[in-house]
Structure formats: C-alpha cells, structure tokens
Amino acid sequence: MSLLLITSCKTEQKVEEPEQKNILFILADDFGYNDISYRNDNFYETPNIDRIAKEGTAFNEGYAACQVCSPSRASILTGKFPARHGITDWIGAKSGEEWRKKNRFSKLLPADYNHNLAKDYVTLPEALKEEGYKTFFAGKWHLGEKGSWPEDHGFDINIGGWDAGSPHGGYFAPYKNPNLKSGKDGENLSMRLAKETVKFMKEHKNEKFFAYLSFYAVHGPIQTTHDKWKKYQEKALINGVEEKGFKMGTFLPIRQTQDNPIYGGLVESMDDAVGVVLDGLKELGLDKNTIIVFTSDNGGVSAGDAFSTSNLPLRGGKGYQYEGGIKEPYFIKVPWIKSKNNQNNTPVSGTDFYPTLLDLVGAKLRPEEHQDGVSLVPLLKGEKIKERPLVWHYPHYGNQGGEPSSIIREGDWKLIHYYEDGRDELYNITLDQEEKNNVVLEHKEMASNLKTKLFDYLAEVGANFPEKDPLYDAEKEAAYLHKVSTKTMQSLEKQRINFLKSDFKPNDDWWGSLQTMD
C-alpha cells in the first residue's frame, strides 16, 4: 500500500491509500440545491446526505449538465455536454410539429433530439469494467428503450432501470416496473433500492465495485407516509404559512414557499435510504476504501410536474435556465484525501464525474470520451484547476415553464441566450446568485465574448436548434397564458393549503399525490 502525506488545518496526518478502491455513486432525481438540511435546516431533515457533504468536499458551484433529467444523466455517464451527445430533452418529450399536440401555442417548434444513449460511446461503467470493476445499477435509468438499458451500457447488474423516468407504481409496492420485482404491498421504493445496493456491496466486498444508486425520488408522483406528512405539516405550521405560495413565471406559476409536507416526507424517506447504504458500507468494513458521490440530475421542481418545492434564493427550478434549474447538491467524499477546506466554490459540472472517478482509482483518463469534463482531484486536494466555460443547451420548452435557451458560464459570468426573440441576459453569479440584475448593457464586451464562445461550441458539436412555428397564433397563446395565470394559479394555491389541513387525505389509495408526465 502507498501512503499519502496530507496536511490538515490542525495536525499533519498520514492517510492510508487503499489498493482496492470502490465507488458508490448516489444520484437523486429532481432534488434541489436547498432541499437539504446541510444548507436549509428550517424545513427539511437530511442528516445522512449531510454526512457526505461534511465528511467530503461540498462543491457550492456544482451544476447538472441540463435543467431536465435524461440529458444530465447521459452527461454523467459520457462526460459530454448534452449538445454534444444529442440527448437535449427528457426522453419522451415531444419535439417539432408534435409539440403542437401540447396545446401550448408556442412561438417555436422545439428541436429534435436523440432518444437513446449512443452505443458507440465508452461510458463510465464500461471504462471501469476495463479496469476490473464489477458494476451495479439500481433505480431510474430513462436513457432509452429496451436495447438501451443499463446492461447495454456497461452495468453487469440492473435492478429497476428501464424506459420510464417516473416510478410508475409510485413509491410503495407494487412498483409496476419490469426490472424490479415488487416486495410486499407498501414496501418503500427508495428503501428497497438502498437494500439492493447493500446486498450487492456485501456480495462483492472483496472485489472492486462501482455501485450506482439512482433514486426515483424525489420525482413525482410525490408520496409519503402519514407519519412523515404529519411531521412536516406541523413544521410548516410552526414556520408560518404564507398567504400566497406562487407567483406567475413566463409560462407557469412558480412555487415560492418550502411548506409542502408530502414533499418533505419524500425527501426524508430518501435520506433514510441513503443512511441504510452508508451504514451498510461501515458494517461491511468498506467505508475507508469507498469513494462516495452524491448529486442530483436537475433542480427542484418549483413549476410543472408536482410543483413540489421552492429553490429560493435561487431563481426558477427544474426545466429553467436559471440557477434553480441547474445548480445541485454536489458532494464527493474520498476517505484517503483530507483537504484543508471541505467547501469549494469552483464551477463544476456533472460531466466532471467521469474523469474524476477514473483519476481517483488510478485509471488512465479518456479525454476522447469525457470531452467536456475535467478531473476535480486537484480541487479535492485543495488545489486549483484551469478556468473553463460550462455550456448548457436546451432548445425546448419542457413541462416546467422554462424557455428554449442556451447558457454559458465562465468564471463569475453567466450568459443566457433565448431563441424566441434572440435576446441575451448577463449575470455576475458571484455577486447576484438570485439573477435579479441583467447587466448585458453595462458589459457588452463580456456578453459578446461569451456569446461567441457559446455559439462556436454549439457549431463545433453540431447542435440542433428550435425553429419558428409558421402556425403560431398570438391570440391563442395569450388565452392559454391567461387561463394558467388565473385558474391554474387558483388551483395550485388551493391545493397547497389543502396539503396542510389537519384532515388532509390523498385522493389515491396510497399516502401521496400527483402523477407527472416525465
């Protein structure tokens, strides 16, 4: 075994670097930047996820590669931004003229996109298999139909991963999942996936393994137990219930309050499951030689779907071009690396996991594969990496109210280009994380430079773009938006208060709520 000499802020430590280095990658779905007690202990309770953040490195400027799920998930596995791998929307979303069937009466027809993860890529699990790793996947996949499931992209074992992006049977058995045998009625899905992960680690504890636990939580339909609902209902009442919980965005109302007791319970259930896996690692004697990653695939759902949470002070949420849609919990724990500071403010992306994990286990990097990712090992050691631009490309409307746009962030600056009218917004994210002050007119040269870099990249990778809809009808769109801003808004406010009533009962035969489209 080799020894790493690490200097901490208190004493100099010798940390033993193991020969067998395992990886546990935990991916939450639709889990917002502030839906965690590590950052927000006023409502949510996530002590187990907090452990990963506190014992590892918390990347405060950690981003998903897209504001919706499938593109981000593909980017984690390929190290490529969505514009490069071509999955730019959640798989199943309508594009082109099919978009008209949504009756949104939009100005643009969303761009087409790839509906399966390309097989000619060497994915992260495939690269690790070449290094002798046993690979395991449990949970949400949503990267293509049969023939493009986890087992087709490098995972030896697949439990629960298939076409669907939401848990079709909800969070309690029976699951209605062709790759996950249901347990007893009422078994919790997140806990089941956690136990399957522990079982895998136990069976392969003497081998190098890559365990990828991809929760369906906290995606809609949001569901919880009566006890957890009651706990968060009482917390919300103690905190004080705002008279209004939503404000109108461009296309949909956006939630402004964190007082959803069903969602709070769902978040805690996922955290309970994380705790089972972390405890399992320790009981198996694997906690000292297993890298742990925790992140999410996009921001919390503040509009559309189940309207679950607020990402304030970050603007927007899932599906949006603002920080609330793309900034995520992003934690990496490496037991044999102890940095002086476990907080890092360098902008990093989901594309960086691929080269970082290869680097951490001593494997050769594959820059021809992870073309848009870099190793974060220097940052984990308290050093620096070269500043580089991060790019997002979402030429779609989606279900949550975001606008077709592309984004570039470099250093402190973030430029958003909108395809409906060609306008640009420029924000200094370091000074203005809430994105309240568009300074594009005050910093024209910076905006121009960033825009050039953005479109040079999009041209290089052959990105697809939306097109104007020749059948666009402004009056129909105005009527649609009026209905949303009145009837939909009223319905959401009524529902929010109903969730908090002492006699609340779900409409279904579970303790839960809304089915979503993706």
Image (cartoon, rainbow, N blue to C red):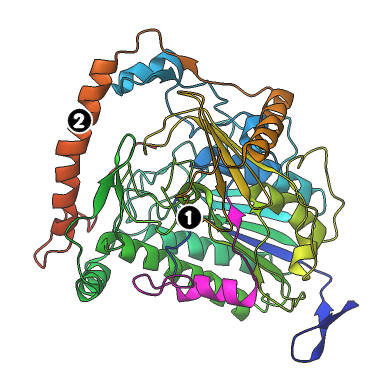
Q: Is residue 158 left or right of residue 488?
A: right
What residue appears at the point 32 percent right and 56 percent down from the top-left corner? 172
Residue 40: x percent and y percent?
42, 70
Residue 334, by quadrant, is bottom right
Assess disc 1: are there few (<14), some (14-19) or many (≥20) residues with their C-alpha within 10 Å of its C-alpha.
many
Magenta span includes 343: no
Magenta span includes 52: yes
Above or below, comparing residue 357 to residue 40 in the picture: above
Above or below, comparing residue 466 to residue 322 in the picture: above
Query: Residue 215 shows which numbered tag?
Result: 1
Instruction: Give the CA distance from mark 1 to mark 2.
Output: 36 Å
**Quarter of the C terminus within the rendering:** top left
The span shown in magenta is: 37-63
Residue 283: x percent and y percent?
60, 80
Mark in front: 1 vs 2: 2
Amino acid carrying label 1: it is: Phe
The reply to whether residue 216 is visible in this rendering is yes
**Quarter of the N terminus within the rendering:** bottom right
Q: Secondary structure at mark 2?
A: helix
Front residue of 22/27: it is 27
Looking at the image, the residue that sits furthest to the top is 470
What residue appears at the point 19 percent right and 47 percent down from the top-left corner? 492
For marks 1 and 2, the one nearer the N-term is 1
Residue for badge 2: 482
Looking at the image, the residue that sits furthest to the right is 2
Amino acid carrying label 2: it is: His
